[in-house]
Image: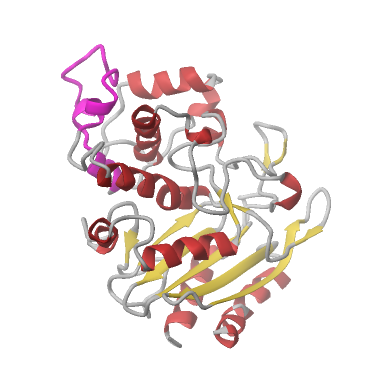
Amino acid sequence: MQELIDNAFKPIAASISLGKIPGAQLGIINKNGVRAVAFGGHAQISPISRSLNRETIFDLASVTKVMFTTIAILDEVAKGNIALDDTLSKHIPDLRQYDIAASERNITIEQCLTHQTFFPAVEPIYSLGLNPTTMRAYILQREWAHFEPRYSDINFLMLGILLERVRKTPLIEQQTPRGTTFSPNPLETAATEFCTWRDRIICGEVHDENAYAFGGASGHAGLFGNIDNVLDFGFNILNSKLLPQEINQKLFEPRTSQRTLGFEIKYENWSGGQACSPHTIGHTGFTGTGIWIDPEREIAWSLLTNRVHPSRHSDSGIIGLRKEIGELICSQI
């Protein structure tokens, strides 16, 4: 598999040499645990230069939604503590507590996992200057505008709050997948963006502004890990090591035309390319990260980049690059 991954890394290396992305790690693992990894480029280019290696940690951004939050929710389902058709208000009774008829109270856990709610895609809640406790209260008490269902960070902010209530533990203190963390060593972490709000290059703290204002960890972002950590997660999903098999299988069962529980499933023009099998699932992160799991080929692959460093306001080509890598990998398996 090393030859395969070295070949798939070539367009990534070209992107690095053209200055579209600073650096990247690419890896593949099969159901038997055989893996191959390639990497190159820089963990940081501004204001200092640091090279990237296999151990470099990345801000996984929205990959947090599947690697942490989805698995944590389904773990609580497996334990019988919650059910997918439970309403949010069953476990967060103070949600919209001044209006017991509020529609937010009737949203279910499954609707959040599959992004079938009326919440907006994202809102700059961090700009209100609230402390983490007050920010949680604001999210719970706000009367949200109604939109057609769309991919929404707010869904997973709500699920993060629910996990804190059910587990009676702040998210940042909860156990994360092996090797991952909410609090990485900055010296071992790839830098992301120069944040005008924080007035610094972000490194070793979550790039997502709402997650940072939430206290550094939230249901939608905050997890950090390297390529081997993400591949370990893919291996565990392929082998039902994190959840009972009957619940793990639900991760591959479509709930909508484009989504399973937490994950996207293959559809036309999706991030994993079209060469993968129909039940392939995956998820991407805004910082330039992603994981894809193909149960028929019995493989998982991941591409981790810091494409937002030093700024998100450039053409990194990450959308096309992800698809190209998926095509190169799956067409050779």
The vertical placement of 200 against 298, above or below, is above
Is residue 150 in view from this perspective? no
Residue placed farthest to the top in the image? 98
Residue drawn at point x = 39 percent, y = 24 percent:
139
Instruction: Provide residue 144's location: percent of width, then percent of height.
Output: 31, 27
Tell me, yes or no, whether the highlighted magenta stretch contains residue 40. no
> Which stretch is magenta?
87-113
Q: Nearer the viewer, residue 288 or 300?
A: 300
The vertical placement of 118 against 12, above or below, is above
Is residue 249 in view from this perspective? yes
Instruction: Provide residue 312's location: percent of width, then percent of height.
Output: 61, 50
Instruction: Provide residue 61's location: percent of width, then percent of height.
Output: 52, 48
Instruction: Provide residue 168's location: percent of width, then percent of height.
Output: 40, 27
Image quadrant occupied by the C terminus: bottom left
Q: Quadrant of residue 331?
A: bottom left
Would you say 76 lies left or right of 134 here?
A: left
Would you say 243 lies left or right of 67 here?
A: left
